Image: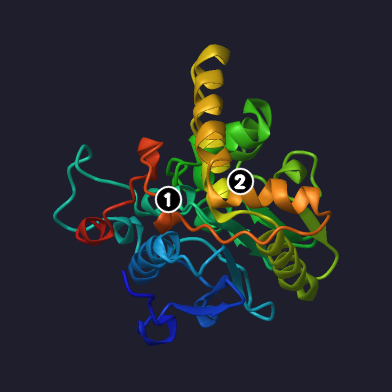
Amino acid sequence: MSPPDYSALGFKEIIVTLENQILVILINRAKFRNTFNEGIVTEMLQIFDLADRDDRVRAVILTAEHTAPAFCSGADINAGWDILWKSDSQDEHAHRDSGGWGSMAVYRCRKITISAVNGHAAGVGATASQLPFDFRFAWAGAKITYPFVRRGISPEATATYLLPRLLGHSRANSLLLTGATVTPTSPYIEALYHRILPTREEVFPAAKAFAEELVANSSQVDIAYAKGLLQHPGDSIEENHLLDSRAIRLLAASPDGEEGVKSFKERRLPKFTDTLSNHTTSFYPWWRRLDVKHLRTKL
């Protein structure tokens, strides 16, 4: 795969820039309160697939312009719920939630992923735009809501899978079954965020500085393995021991494994150079990427 030119991809709903190995995705629908539509879901699927395969990308940050009315106000439902599916997928068994496709695309990305929530967030702005990310930074004054039960629809974007695992079942109940509006400092949701910043303007710079530190001092391949083990542990401590053992054996013999020992002995910061494209060992089945072309036909 030749490295993509992100400025030439023709995105309309997002603005994408790559600088110093950090890919920044800016939601570009401020006049619509950064609501999600079919176009933004399609573009998000494409960009996370590209980021996963592009060795130049070490971290991905999703954010919005801090002066926008909201980080993301949810799905654009001005025309009703029909926006959520195609006319040929009325069958309840055939339908696949587009927010869920977005969540899975982020979750399966093997790079560091960060959501910089510098505004209010509702619906998909609180689910797919936050929950599947590795780290979340938030403005303390943001209003966060999962309003589904108050809108006559069930929670979407795999929230009922991710939220209990991130916060525990009790807190997930408090958020999903009440549809209440909270701020990031609420005891129900505070643990979701890596950092909570006092102003909107501080959120993205803090997230970017965090990404820069991780990029400079971590191995691209090791991050992918660690994410895989966290997301798909064994069903028992014995099975997890087998997975851990195989990962350690494979990585210890890798260029980055050797550099980790060498830099430790020489008392200096490591210079990791190994990339996922060079690491052809098929260790985990979830490393299979989403078939983005196929998914676009389903949205």
> In front: 175, or 18?
18
The relative height of residue 223 versus residue 32 in the rendered view (above or below) is: above
Number of residues whose C-alpha sits closer than 10 Å to that of mark 2, classed few (under 14), some (14–19) or many (20 or more):
some
Q: Which amino acid does label 2 sit on?
A: Gly
- Residue shown at 57% from the left, 61% from the top: 273
User: Going by the picture, which residue comes out furthest to the left?
Assistant: 88
Number of residues whose C-alpha sits closer than 10 Å to that of mark 1, classed few (under 14), some (14–19) or many (20 or more):
few
The relative height of residue 249 versus residue 82 in the rendered view (above or below) is: above
Q: Where is residue 263 in the image (x, y as percent from the top left)?
A: 74, 53
**Which mark, by number, is residue 147?**
none
Q: Position of residue 187 (x, y in %)?
A: 80, 40
**Residue depth check, mark 1 versus mark 2: number of the one nearer the observer:** 2
- Residue shown at 71% from the left, 65% from the top: 207
The relative height of residue 18 versus residue 167 in the rendered view (above or below) is: below
- The residue to which callout 2 is attached is 257
Where's the C terminus, which quadrant? Answer: bottom left
Disc with the residue nearer the chain's start (1 vs 2): 2
- Residue shown at 25% from the left, 56% from the top: 295
- The residue to which callout 1 is attached is 279
- Residue shown at 53% from the left, 32% from the top: 249
> In front: 271, or 134?
271
Where's the N terminus, which quadrant? Answer: bottom left
User: Can residue 134 be seen in the rendering of this structure?
Assistant: no
Q: Position of residue 271 (x, y in %)?
A: 67, 62
Q: Is mark 1 on a helix, strand or loop?
A: loop
Left/right of residue 174 with respect to residue 242 in the rendered view: right
